[in-house]
Image (cartoon, helix red, strand yellow):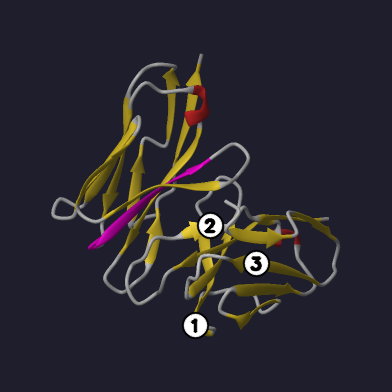
Amino acid sequence: NTKITQSPRYLILGRANKSLECEQHLGHNAMYWYKQSAEKPPELMFLYNLKQLIRNETVPSRFIPECPDSSKLLLHISAVDPEDSAVYFCASSQSRVSNERLFFGHGTKLSVL
Amino acid sequence: GDKVKQSPSALSLQEGTNSALRCNFSIAATTVQWFLQNPRGSLINLFYLVPGTKENGRLKSAFDSKESYSTLHIRDAQLEDSGTYFCAAWNSNNRIFFGDGTQLVVKP
């Protein structure tokens, strides 16, 4: 799926700060961050609609999202913990007002040393 | 998840055979999506359904909102069908719930 791009693809961190980036070229209004741990389904972290934070699930405060414009989404991570090792997916849908089809990026695999 | 129950949790198929995956919902699902997570980890859209059926090549999916279930039928399974299949259901509050997935292995 080249319509939702995420960077970096792989990330290996010690206790450092890093940002994940996502950009969608679908003209969608809603953007999401999901976390997928091994052998589990994706779990919603944050949902933005038209640059507004709509949903903020129970996520450690070291994860801070940012939506600089409606096509871009960032996830700032400070002082990562080993439990943060997972794949982080960006997703988008046309809107969050109606139940629109969800599209996922290819994910960023985070490995915490 | 407890709101979306997928079965079976794992499945092994011989190449060329047929099978069906199922999701039962304990929520009032309004729309359903099926995804394939391939061995590289990508989540691929397969179907997006309102109540009814859709077909795409060797795959066919149905969603019955009254009986609260959805199925995904795979015909003539191929090696590249291997991966984890997730169903996800939206409720009327615009929340999406994922099942725990079915791990499919297609063997030659």
Could you say which quadrant of the image residue B90 lies in?
A: bottom left
Kind of residue indicated by mark 3? Cys
Q: Chain of mark 2?
A: A
Give the residue at mark 3: A22
Residue A14 lies in the magenta-colored region: no
Residue stretch rendered in magenta on the structure: B28-37
Query: B52 or A38: which is nearer to us?
Result: B52
Disc on res. B18: none
Residue B36 lies in the magenta-colored region: yes
Residue B50 placement, left or right of A102: left
Give the residue at mark 1: A50
Kind of residue indicated by mark 1? Leu
Of labels 1 and 3, earlier in sequence is 3
Query: B39 or A37: which is nearer to us?
Result: B39
Contact, CB < 8 Å: mark 1 with mark 2?
Answer: no
Give the residue at mark 2: A104
Q: Secondary structure at mark 3?
A: strand
At a point 51% along the width and 23% down the height, the residue shown is B79
